Image (cartoon, helix red, strand yellow):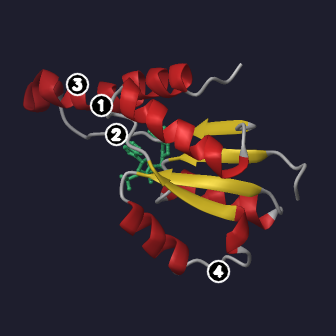
Amino acid sequence: MCCRPYRVTIGTSSGFGKRLMLSILARGDRVIASARSLEKLETMISSSSIQDRNRLRTLHLDVSEGEEKIKAQIDLAVTFWGQIDVLVNNAGIGLASLVEEGGSKILRKQFETNVFGVLDVRLQSSLP
Ligand SMILES: NC(=O)c1ccc[n+]([C@@H]2O[C@H](COP(=O)([O-])OP(=O)(O)OC[C@H]3O[C@@H](n4cnc5c(N)ncnc54)[C@H](OP(=O)(O)O)[C@@H]3O)[C@@H](O)[C@H]2O)c1
């Protein structure tokens, strides 16, 4: 177990991220699963049939919180098992609205997560 790559997956409370986390664990690898709400994530984990919790750690991370907070959480993740091998930023939102209805406010919200969130995680994760 010590030499297998480990992943950090961001946005794992539902959907693709949840499936990815479960499939990483099923193949015997380690994963740090992150979510905006640790409570929601823990509830999901409790209701999933995870065999070995020793290979799973959880982390609060909101990709829209800005560079400093993201860096602090990535640094915290590194203290769990050392340097991150693979980081999957799955966090994303799709807000269904016509531009005429939502205006720039709704677009800003999407950009905070889907564009600047991706950029901030990339810049703060010290991956090659
Ligand atoms: N499903 C599709 O057809 C489709 C199509 C194109 C692209 N995508 C993209 O694929 C990814 C997964 O989609 P999905 O269908 O599995 O969606 P999903 O079930 O809504 O999952 C998105 C995940 O991102 C998390 N998230 C949202 N905003 C976040 C933030 N600011 N910081 C951290 N985590 C955040 C959500 O966690 P919370 O519990 O905190 O909300 C959730 O765990 C998304 O990036 C989505 O935009 C999906």
Quick check: 13 left or right of 29? left
Label 1, secondary structure: give it: helix
Give the residue at mark 1.
110
If you read the primary sequence from the N terminus, does the residue marked by circle 3 or circle 4 appear first?
4
Front in this rendered view, residue 81 or 53:
81
Tag 3: residue type? Arg
Residue 46 drawn at (x, y percent): 52, 79
Does the beta carbon of the residue at mark 2 sit less than 8 Å from ligand 1? yes
Front in this rendered view, residue 6 or 22:
6
Give me the C-alpha separation between circle 2 and circle 4. Answer: 29 Å
Label 4, secondary structure: give it: loop
Q: In the image, which is nearer the foreground, mark 2 or mark 3?
A: 3
Give the residue at mark 2.
94
Q: Are discs 2 and 1 less than 8 Å apart at CB?
A: yes
Q: Are discs 3 and 1 less than 8 Å apart at CB?
A: yes
Q: Quadrant of residue 25?
A: bottom right
Q: In the image, which is nearer the foreground, mark 2 or mark 4?
A: 4
- Residue 22 seen by the camera: no
Q: Quadrant of residue 109?
A: top left
Tag 2: residue type? Gly
Q: Are discs 2 and 4 less than 8 Å apart at CB?
A: no
Give me the C-alpha separation between circle 2 and circle 1. Answer: 7 Å
Q: In the image, which is nearer the foreground, mark 4 or mark 1?
A: 4
Q: Which mark is residue 108?
A: 3
If you read the primary sequence from the N terminus, does the residue marked by circle 4 or circle 1 appear first?
4
Vertical relation: 35 (above or below) 44: above
Give me the C-alpha separation between circle 3 and circle 1. Answer: 5 Å
Give the residue at mark 4.
49
Residue 57 drawn at (x, y percent): 60, 60
If you read the primary sequence from the N terminus, does the residue marked by circle 2 or circle 4 appear first?
4
At horizontal 32% and vertical 34% (from top left) the residue drawn is 65
